[in-house]
Amino acid sequence: MLRLSALDIEDLAVISAQMQDAVLLAGDMTYNPRRKQFVLLANRFAWDAAQNPERRRTGLHFDRVLSVKTLNMSGLEKDEVLSLLSVTFAEIDAPGGEVLLSFSGGVTVRLIVECLECQLADLGPAWGAKSMPQHPTDGEDPV
């Protein structure tokens, strides 16, 4: 079971790599402005156990979130499946900045944060994945 924290760009790159190809329902993301916290629940592909493809239920949360904006989500139903491609951070007004969660289909969630504070935690046992996610190499069309 994986437990990671990120307080800088390098830490977040590790979390992004572990969360790549995580699948979740659009309704499995929530923002609590009073607590300044954004949370999502996903079934991440366990890249740390790629020799035996498996997925794990994982929680990912960001603290000190001032606002959340979305792109290309307005027409999505809460039960629509999204695939997470990457999580990045850009410092705007140190130590604050924006976290971008990029999903397939051009869906983006942008978090404006006071500073980068992120935690990932696996929440239960793994189960076998039907297949390993495939990514096209540069210049190739996806299969």
Image (spheres, rainbow, N blue to C red):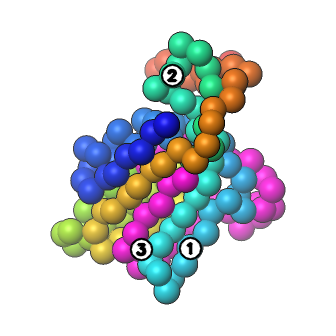
Mark 3 vs mark 2, CA separation in Å:
31 Å
Q: Which of marks 3 and 1 is nearer the N terminus?
A: 1
Check whether the beta carbons of the residues at disc 3 and disc 1 lie within 8 A of each other.
yes
Residue 137 visible to an observer of this rendering: yes
Specify few, some or many for label 3: CA neighbours under 10 Å numbering under 14, 14-19, or 20 or more. Answer: many
Q: Give the range drawn in magenta.
A: 59-87
Q: What residue type is labelled 1?
A: Tyr
Q: Where in the figure is residue 19, as x and y percent of width and height?
A: 50, 40
Count of all numbered marks drawn on residues in the image: 3
Secondary structure beneath label 2: helix
In magenta stretch: residue 35: no
As helix, strand or loop, the secondary structure at mark 1 comes to strand
Camera-side residue of 39 and 72: 39
Residue at figure coordinates x 53%, y 19% from the top left = 50
In front of the other: label 2 or label 1? 2
Per the image, the residue denoted by label 2 is: 49
Q: Where is residue 85 in the image (x, y as percent from the top left)?
A: 53, 41
Identify the residue position indicated by label 1 in the image: 31
**Foreground label between 3 and 2:** 2
Label pair 3/2, CB-CB below 8 angstroms: no
Q: Sequence order check: which comes first, mark 3 or mark 2?
A: 2
Place of residue 130 in the rendered image (x, y in percent of width and height, measured from the top left) = 74, 22
Which label number is shown at residue 65?
Answer: 3
